[in-house]
Amino acid sequence: MLRQALSTLVVGAILASLGACGTGGNTTGKRLVGISMPQGSSDRWRVDGRSMVEEFEAMGYASDLQYADDNIARQIAQIDNMISGNAEILIIASIDGTKLADVLAKAAAKKIPVIAYDRLIRDSPDVDCYATFDNYMVGVLQASFIEAGLGLSSGQGPFTIELFAGSPDDNNAYVFFDGAMAILQPYIDAHRLVVRSGLTDIDQITTMRWDGDIAEARMASLLATSYRNVRLDAVLAPYDGISRGVISALRFAGYGSPGQPLPIVTGQDAELASVKSIIAGVQSQTVFKDTRLLAKAAAQMSLSVMRGQQPTINDLKSYDNGKKVVPSYLLDPVSVDKTNYRSVLIDSGYYTETQLTT
């Protein structure tokens, strides 16, 4: 819902910036929605794309869903083709949120609205809305799990920890990290959490393209240089693919035995492999972002925009993309571990019992 503080003036400005779209032609005879996803190799983006197509089909719209395989030039070309193909609106989860200004200017010239999906598109005035989760809270949930698991709030410590962050070209990586450090930094300052590598600045710990192999190599290096005779107690990992890479390096170094249990390892996206790992007692936690709800929110937002109506917005201050504060709709993430995966993931129908046990 819109916040009560949303003024008539702001609403008017949003509506003026969005405008109504003309009807474009396509081979189905239906109004066309362009959906650009960064890649289709992970569970996360496949589910997002499929969910949005289903939502738009149910509304009577055609969809042009494209995956860019983490290739920036390919994503730009795909968006350009959607613009040429008479898409009435673009929903974009960017690979690099700083590289789309030129192609979005083309969309603006044709009065095609743009919705940033999950990842903020930066440095462009031509982003009309943003549909995402409360990304700051994602980091808070990850760090709070570490805080509780180590007993930091009850005075336990000191413990060792290493920090991983997401891709430096994804705005979300910085928001996740800020949320996590709001919890962890006081313990680091008090020396109750010790980062033996000394790497605590986000620019030192990013993981390009959220790549698990890069994370695995970095974790192996940290273990060899900073933890040769010292136990590692926790790892802040921002995404399940990174988590799995970290765990692979830990196991290779001898963690995961009764005498050397794995450290706490967080994650995000509740990917199937990581949920199975949590059930098996390997990965400790993930953050579930129900992308079915995000797809529905983006579809409803798009429908409002195409009708020239007011979209549902609940945040008007958090996401400044360098050119404007982008009106946003934020959904709530949920922390998942071995104690609640069933109620959160199975009871909601996101996964079946069979998927998680086979």
Image (cartoon, grey):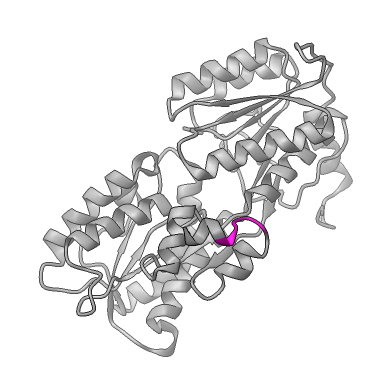
Counting from the top left corner in percent of width and height, residue 123 is at 55, 31
Q: Is residue 170 left or right of residue 319?
A: left
Counting from the top left corner in percent of width and height, residue 315 is at 71, 51
Q: Magenta includes 351?
A: yes
Residue displayed at 23% across by 62% down: 250
- Residue 122 visible in the picture: yes
Q: Magenta includes 243?
A: no
Establish if 343 lies above or below 350: below
Counting from the top left corner in percent of width and height, residue 214 is at 28, 44
- Residue 239 visible in the picture: no
Quadrant of the rendered structure where residue 283 is? bottom left
Establish if 6 lies above or below 345: above
Judged by its main secondary structure, the magenta piece is loop
Counting from the top left corner in percent of width and height, residue 195 is at 26, 67
Residue displayed at 79% across by 11% down: 25
Task: Give the magenta-colored segment's residue range.
Answer: 349-353
Quadrant of the rendered structure where residue 210 is? top left
Q: Nearest the camera: 159 or 67?
A: 67
Q: Number of marks in the image?
A: 0
Establish if 190 lies above or below 23: below
Residue displayed at 21% across by 76% down: 260
Quarter of the image for the N terminus: give it: bottom right
Q: Is residue 321 left or right of residue 240?
A: right
Residue displayed at 36% across by 51% down: 242
Quadrant of the rendered structure where residue 62 is? top right
Q: Is residue 1 left or right of residue 129?
A: right
